[in-house]
Image: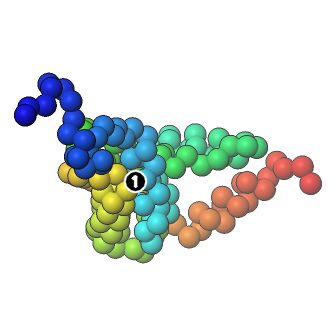
Amino acid sequence: MTEPSGSKNPTADPAERGRTTIADGVVAKIAGMAAREVDGVHALGGGLARTVGAVRDRVPGGRASVTRGVKVEVGERQSAIDLELVVEYGVAIVDVAGDVRENVIEAVERMTGLEVVEVNIAVDDVHLPEEEDEEEESSSEGRVK
């Protein structure tokens, strides 16, 4: 007996009945969170994106974008990810990049089932310890006390 064209075998694995699509933004959020979890990563995003993001984050109700500094391409079975990092001064950049790449690949593949074909990392800046003091001073200036 043959099945009518286009019908599914009712005994087929339920996981294969239908299609799942994963939006670029979902992969970008997963990758951004996974990258930030790595020791030695100060922030994601470079130059203008960080400056604009910092201003937006100070506005009441504004919140840091998890996807700042993350670009992804998502296909049916694969994804490619580009990250812009700011690393802490004193860390071995090559080691941090390797750890970020490993953590991002593991998280995206585990959560989405997509194969990550590449994770490209651009280190745009190094965060210096004295920059922390300058950021705190500038954020407290101009506030009503």
Q: Residue at x 73, y 54 (%)?
A: 139
**Residue 133 vertical position relative to residue 6 in the rendered view, above or below:** below
Q: Residue at x 47, y 46 (%)?
A: 67
| Callout count | 1
Please state the horizontal and vertical placement of residue 42, each as a whole percent of the image: 50, 63
Q: Residue at x 92, y 54 (%)?
A: 145
Please state the horizontal and vertical placement of residue 20, each as a whole percent of the image: 33, 40
Q: Secondary structure at mark 1?
A: helix
Evaluate whether residue 1 shows in this view. Answer: yes
Farthest left residue? 1
Q: Residue at x 50, y 41 (%)?
A: 49
Please state the horizontal and vertical placement of residue 16, each as a whole percent of the image: 26, 44
Find residue 95 and report its image quarter. bottom left
**Left or right of 64 in this view: 138:** right
Colour scheme employed for the rendering of this structure: rainbow
Farthest front residue? 1
> Observer-nearest residue: 94 or 15?
15
**Residue 41 vertical position relative to residue 121 in the rendered view, above or below:** below
**Left or right of 133 in this view: 87:** left
Evaluate whether residue 125 shows in this view. Answer: no
Quarter that holds the N terminus: top left
Farthest right residue? 145
Find disc 1 in the rendering and name its residue. Answer: 31
**Dot 1, how many residues are within 10 Å of its Cα: few (below 14), some (14-19), or many (20+)?**
many
> Observer-nearest residue: 119 or 77?
77
Question: Looking at the picture, which amino acid does disc 1 mark?
Answer: Ala
> Observer-nearest residue: 29 or 84?
29
Please state the horizontal and vertical placement of residue 108, each as a whole percent of the image: 34, 55
> Observer-nearest residue: 93 or 66?
66
